[in-house]
Image (cartoon, helix red, strand yellow):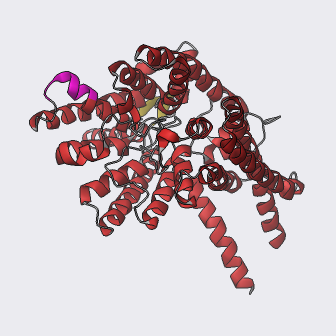
Amino acid sequence: MENKQNYDIKIISYYTGFIILWTSLLMLIPIIVSILFKEWGALADFIISINIALSTGLILIMFGKKSLGKVRFQWKHGLIVASLSWILLMFLCAIPYRLSGHALSFLDAAFDVMSGFTTTGLVLTQDLEHLSLSLNTWRHILTFVGGQGMVVLALSFLMRDTAGAYKMYVGEGKDIELVPNVKGTARIIWAISMSYLAVGTLLMWINGMMIGLKPVSAFFHGLFIFMSAWSTGGFAPMSQNILYYHSMSYEILTIIFFIIGSFNFGLHYAVWQGNKKEIVKNIEIQSFFITATLTSFFIALGLSKLNVYTDAVSIFRKGIYHLLSAHTTTGFASLYARQFALEWGDFAVIMLIIAMLIGGSACSTAGGFKGLRVGIVFKGIIADIKKLLSSERRVRVFKFHHIKDLILDDGVVKSTSLIIICYVVLFSIGTVIGSYYGYPLLSSAFEAASVTGNVGLSIGVTSPSMPSLMKLFYIIAMFLGRLEFISVFALVGFLFGGIKKICSRR
């Protein structure tokens, strides 16, 4: 038994090291940027950081290499590797933040890295306006890669498809197979993302120059904002976020990109393959259209009632923009955080909370408990009603369409409902913790919904001065919400199981 546990640890170590190694190599990009723009202090920070990160990855690979072929890669291994690699990478990728001096503590640096990885977008980094270009590049690389997933990145470089690849892929909160092998699926996901990156950055660059930014500045602003929009991440190079640009055209472009970014990669691939009808038939698109329309209507109604904004353009730019930003879990904002609490009124804020919790599509860059699950639960309720009203002798099979026709059985509805319950429980705990520390109930609920749904909008609670316990809980909530609980539960079970065995032997 002891020998088997050692092999479990070693095989987990090997694949965790593999993911860390490939993700750490991304630091070469800000290193190049720091050389080009002569940011020598930042260059030193990243050289130190990449050496620590690569050394960690290589040590884990060497420690676990002898386990290959001696133990079968199981589901528990895949789930644990996915969650453990995210935790270790959070610490390793936080080193440049802390060395830069823009994070007041290592906890703040780790918070911002997890916020980037999970495409949440909440920020504790200080003085964004004076951040080095290389560190700003690193921030947005993290959120862009986090949208696709670090496991997806690493799997793209596998020499051959392995039995464990799919199990790690699922551990990162994804389950769709675009092609028969997971390595091919990972590469297609990156091909889709990089194609949009090229087109999106070009459009944002042109628009940036049109609104008065200098060409080089417009390019980097366009690149960073697209990365955040596509990954529904919410990071921006300036502390005022989207408000900094004061441009309706810039806002409209971001709406287009973050809505597209919130769609399932399977939907993108189906459309690329010529199956345009999938856009209309897909249950997630139907669910998103219905919930976004309803919440947008209620937001406009609530803001109009309070006369917060006096014309339709203002309601669209300030109200509907934030609703869509919340619903896609992007977190871009063209308002100051406290304006939600001081101007919007309780009703409009509650609509934002609902939208943040629902989120975008499954197997996308978005967070929340997903439109797919909302659609399945709704169809499950309708199916149960129809069963009650129909003849007992008649056997009816109910289906839903998600890339292909799938059977809606009780097991699917039950598992879907359990995940939604997990999100609601996590959101409730976050609300209670915020209230305990003296924040108003609605503000606590807003911030809890933002971290649980990986959104990034803030009502003013998130700041370097908030209690360390809240920062730690928000990190955990972002992590759980992004990986959708199962792989994190597997890691916790494995760790506590190992501790229990050690204690029992003593």
Residue 323 in which image quadrant: top left
Q: Please state if 8 lies on the left or on the right of 199 as rendered.
A: right
Vertical order, 346 against 179 (above or below): below
Q: What percent of the width, then of the height, locates residue 351?
A: 25, 42
Q: In the current view of this chain or complex, which residue is farthest to the bottom?
A: 506
Q: Quadrant of residue 105?
A: bottom right
**Location of residue 357 in the rendering, given as x and y in whole percent from the top left corner:** 36, 46
Quadrant for the C terminus in the image: bottom right
Q: Residue at x 59, y 19 (%)?
A: 198
Q: In this orientation, which residue lies closer to the viewer: 167 or 356?
A: 356
Query: Residue at (50%, 58%) from the top-left corner?
Result: 476
User: Would you say 410 lies left or right of 243 here?
Assistant: right
Magenta stretch: dominant secondary structure: helix
Which range is magenta? 310-317
Q: Is residue 340 left or right of residue 177?
A: left
Q: Position of residue 421 (x, y in %)?
A: 39, 55
